[in-house]
Image (spheres, rainbow, N blue to C red):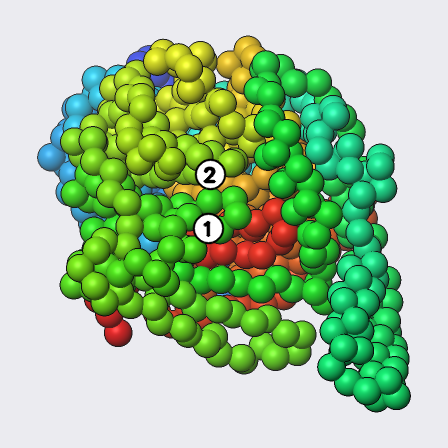
């Protein structure tokens, strides 16, 4: 680059920026240099300095030139990938927000084709972590889209908060200042907020908040999360009544009752002496086992009873006396689970589904199982009748696998008991009425009704006693992804592609509440234990908690990096678990809105979550063909002050992983007696 070209470039830059005084001063200096050059014949050799020449060349390019964006981002990317391994992961976090804003800036300046070239050149770097965001970003094809599309508008108005250690931050800032990259520096200054911490770099897997969206979105979330919520259980619940009357049986009492019955039977069959010896020996062994189990399990069983009591915000239905007595009997005989007392698991496998099964659901007592299919049908199997009724094995069969979980036997394989129909009768009840694929199904608490949601935008109520469709609820404008009965029945909620969730009553055809606020599809939802709140999970990577009385959002949970697929509420109503498409599970404290612990273990989508009835265990079912059991008390009982001092987040302890023989897990359900039911599907019989 010769001297005249450099002078021309600098003049062009100063004139474009409107720096008139600087332009005049530059002209005067150039004239003085020419005079000195004529007098001393010493030419200024600017092109001998490559750094200065490169800087002036970059400054001479128009600021809205796509080539500058491409050049600066490419060099930043090369520098980050060539950094030391210790700091590379932290430095690579910067690339994605810079990439997004470079692309949107090029689009905003009207260079659409250049923006597409830039996007396609570097999208592979971010495909694994941000595939869904890239699909949305790919649709931004004009400056007007930046304002019209909520996703793009939110990104441009917000900042990204990135946790980074002090040394990594110094390395990055020194490199950017030395390189004199005005575009990258501007993006970093305007759209990235670095949360610098002393010490060694932190891995993203160790800290779920390593990269989060802040700014206007986070400010709004912080304001919402200050609202007061009442997470306790309902007054005068069946559990409370049973506890007041002392109706809960300890494990010792249960085993003593069983022993007495066994003794009576043995006395009838054996001789007097032999009967006494056998009974006393049997009783002594059971007493020892029961006392050991009781010491560990009983303290964890008080979690639900210790929860505060709140009044219902919705009118609750009256429970029939016979149903109430049945539930009380189940509660009295509930098995108290703990980290050393794991549940038995009954696993149902749909085979020969040919990828037509979209969803499955299990009734609260495990007696009924439903499947929603792509051909718009809903099928319900009665487990009690399955052995007596036969079916057509060419279309679909159910295989029942029973897992016996024993302490210390982690590698025990599940045993299978196949049940195949042989006669011409169907083994299931067929419900037809939808005109599109069925995406969700849920049983009422008593099992007498079932709800289904479909791509035809409707929700249908069916009677399992009459085997008929009772009501068709219309209100959503797009496919309905999920529907869930409330814990007391009567009310239910639906989630849709129209980015809303709606609350319904069985006796009304119009929704009672419409909850809007998510930026993308509402994919799943879950009722709170006291029926006063509903949690919704969305493709916008957030979970929201809504007040059913006012329809307002009272909590926003930010931390997931992909769409939310499943939710679960703890029985005491204090905690919530959420799982996403990447296999990450997060445990949240509803009071503070903070993440207590990430659960790292699954390597694929987690489609179902379920808390045990006393809240000591969390079960997760995944597309990686496993069911995992987590010790909830490990993390939730740790004081927050200890966490903040240590700087580390407690993780829930993984107790057991159950392989399901190449069967993805669709549904999990703990019965009232703490038996875990699970369901999965295979396209073909193995």
**Mark 2, residue position:** 447
Q: To which residue does mark 1 refer?
A: 367
CB contact under 8 Å: marks 1 and 2: yes
Q: Where's the N terminus, which quadrant?
A: top left
Out of 244 and 221, give the one closest to the viewer. Answer: 244
x and y, in percent, of residue 654 in the image: 61, 63
Q: Residue at x 73, y 37 (%)?
A: 239
Q: Is residue 664 left or right of residue 245?
A: left
x, y (%) of residue 480? 30, 30
- Up the image or down, 216 lies above or below 198; here it is above
SS of the residue under disc 1: loop
Secondary structure state at the residue bearing disc 2: loop
Does label 1 or label 2 sit earlier along the sequence? 1
Left or right side of 114 for 76 = right
Name the residue located 21 percent from the left edge and 55 percent from the top edge. 425
User: Residue 332: horizontal and vertical position, in percent?
Assistant: 73, 47
């Amino acid at each position: 680059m010769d001297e005249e070209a450099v002078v021309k470039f600098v003049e062009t830059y100063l004139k474009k920026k409107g720096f008139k005084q600087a332009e005049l001063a530059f002209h005067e200096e150039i004239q003085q240099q020419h005079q000195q050059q004529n007098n001393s014949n010493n030419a200024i050799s600017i092109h001998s300095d490559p750094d200065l020449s490169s800087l002036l060349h970059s400054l001479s390019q128009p600021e809205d030139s796509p080539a500058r964006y491409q050049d600066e981002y490419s060099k930043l990317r090369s520098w980050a990938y060539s950094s030391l391994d210790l700091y590379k992961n932290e430095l690579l976090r910067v690339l994605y927000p810079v990439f997004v804003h470079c692309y949107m800036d090029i689009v905003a300046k009207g260079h659409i084709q250049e923006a597409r070239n830039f996007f396609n050149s570097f999208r592979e770097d971010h495909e694994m972590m941000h595939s869904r965001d890239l699909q949305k970003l790919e649709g931004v094809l004009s400056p007007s889209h930046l304002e019209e599309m909520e996703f793009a508008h939110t990104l441009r108005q917000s900042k990204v908060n990135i946790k980074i250690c002090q040394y990594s931050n110094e390395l990055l800032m020194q490199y950017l200042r030395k390189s004199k990259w005005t575009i990258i520096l501007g993006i970093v200054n305007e759209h990235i907020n670095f949360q610098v911490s002393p010490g060694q770099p932190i891995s993203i897997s160790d800290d779920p908040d390593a990269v989060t969206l802040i700014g206007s979105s986070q400010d709004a979330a912080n304001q919402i999360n200050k609202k007061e919520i009442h997470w306790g259980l309902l007054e005068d619940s069946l559990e409370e009544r049973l506890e007041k009357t002392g109706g809960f049986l300890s494990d010792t009492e249960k085993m003593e009752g069983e022993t007495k019955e066994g003794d009576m039977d043995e006395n009838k069959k054996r001789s007097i002496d032999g009967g006494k010896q056998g009974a006393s020996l049997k009783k002594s062994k059971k007493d020892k086992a029961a006392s050991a189990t009781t010491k560990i399990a009983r303290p964890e069983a008080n979690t639900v009873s210790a929860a505060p009591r709140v009044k219902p915000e919705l009118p609750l239905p009256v429970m029939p006396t016979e149903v109430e007595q049945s539930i009380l009997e189940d509660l009295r005989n509930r098995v108290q689970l703990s980290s050393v007392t794991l549940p038995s698991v009954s696993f149902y496998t749909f085979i020969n589904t040919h990828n037509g099964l979209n969803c499955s659901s299990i009734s609260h007592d495990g007696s009924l199982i439903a499947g929603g299919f792509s051909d718009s049908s809903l099928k319900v199997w009665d487990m009690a009748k399955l052995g007596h009724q036969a079916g057509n094995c060419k279309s679909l069969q159910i295989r029942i696998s029973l897992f016996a979980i024993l302490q210390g036997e982690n590698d025990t394989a599940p045993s299978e008991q196949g049940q195949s129909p042989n006669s011409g009768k169907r083994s299931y009840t067929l419900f037809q009425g939808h005109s599109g694929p069925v995406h969700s199904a849920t049983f009422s608490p008593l099992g007498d009704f079932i709800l289904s949601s479909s791509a035809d935008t409707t929700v249908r109520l069916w009677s399992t006693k009459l085997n008929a469709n009772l009501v068709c609820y219309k209100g959503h404008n797009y496919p309905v992804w999920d529907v869930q009965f409330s814990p007391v029945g009567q009310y239910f909620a639906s989630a849709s592609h129209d980015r809303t969730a709606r609350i319904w009553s069985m006796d009304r055809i119009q929704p009672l509440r419409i909850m809007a606020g998510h930026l993308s599809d509402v994919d799943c939802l879950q009722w709170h234990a006291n029926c006063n709140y509903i949690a919704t999970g969305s493709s916008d990577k957030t979970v929201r908690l809504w007040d059913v009385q006012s329809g307002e959002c009272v909590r926003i949970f930010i931390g997931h990096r992909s769409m939310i697929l499943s939710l679960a509420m703890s029985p005491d109503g204090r905690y919530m678990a959420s799982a996403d498409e990447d296999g990450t599970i997060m445990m949240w404290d509803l009071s503070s809105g903070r993440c207590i612990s990430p659960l790292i273990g699954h390597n694929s989508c987690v489609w179902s979550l379920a808390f045990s009835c006393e809240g000591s265990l969390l079960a997760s079912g995944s597309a990686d063909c496993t069911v995992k059991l987590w010790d909830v008390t490990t993390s939730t009982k740790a004081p927050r002050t200890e966490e903040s001092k240590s700087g580390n987040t407690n993780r829930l302890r993984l107790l057991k992983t159950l392989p399901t023989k190449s069967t993805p897990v669709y549904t999990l359900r703990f019965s009232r007696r703490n038996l875990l039911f699970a369901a999965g599907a295979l396209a073909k019989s193995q």
